[in-house]
Amino acid sequence: MRTTLEIDDRVLSLARERAHRDGVSLGRAVSDLALRGISHGSRTSRHGIPLFFPPAGQQAHVVTPELIEQYRDDDH
């Protein structure tokens, strides 16, 4: 769907960076950012720890305490 929007310069800059990085159109990048905001609401932390979310439509690797322990104990 085509429409005209007034977008904050910071949002436009971020959307352009993501569009270039992900090889998608600017419109798709703006839509992904909007969908990401909708799906995650405004929550940015849990129990005082910042939350990080993958781009919309992408899976994230879950970091568990066991995984942290494994990497901490690894000599590499």
Image (tube, helix red, strand yellow):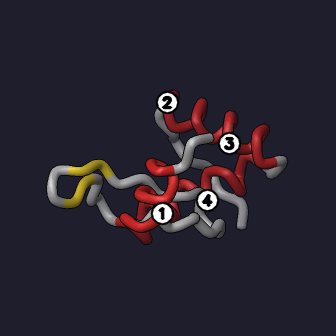
Residue 75 percent across, percent down from the top left: 57, 42
The crowding category of the residue bearing disc 2, from other C-alpha atoms within 10 Å (few below 14, some 14 to 19, many at least 20), is few
Neighbourhood count class around disc 3 (C-alpha, 10 Å): few under 14, some 14–19, many 20 upward = many
The answer to which quarter of the image holds residue 58 is bottom right
- Could you say whether the residue bearing mark 3 is in a helix, strand or loop? helix
Q: Position of residue 68 (x, y in %)?
A: 43, 56
SS class, disc 1 = helix
Q: CA distance from mark 1 to mark 3?
A: 29 Å
Left or right: residue 16 versus residue 7 is right
The location of residue 76, given as percent across then percent down, is 62, 41
Q: Which tag, 2 or 1, sits closer to the chain's start? A: 2
Q: Are marks 3 and 4 in contact (CB under 8 Å)?
A: no
- Which is more N-terminal, label 2 or label 3? 2
In the displayed structure, 44 sits above or below 21; it is below
* Kind of residue at disc 3: Arg
Separation of disc 2 and disc 1 at Cα?
35 Å
Q: Which residue is mark 1?
A: 67
Mark nearer the N terminus (2 vs 4):
2
Of 72 and 35, nearer the camera is 72
Q: Which residue is mark 2?
A: 10
Residue wearing tag 3: 18
Q: What residue does disc 4 label?
A: 31
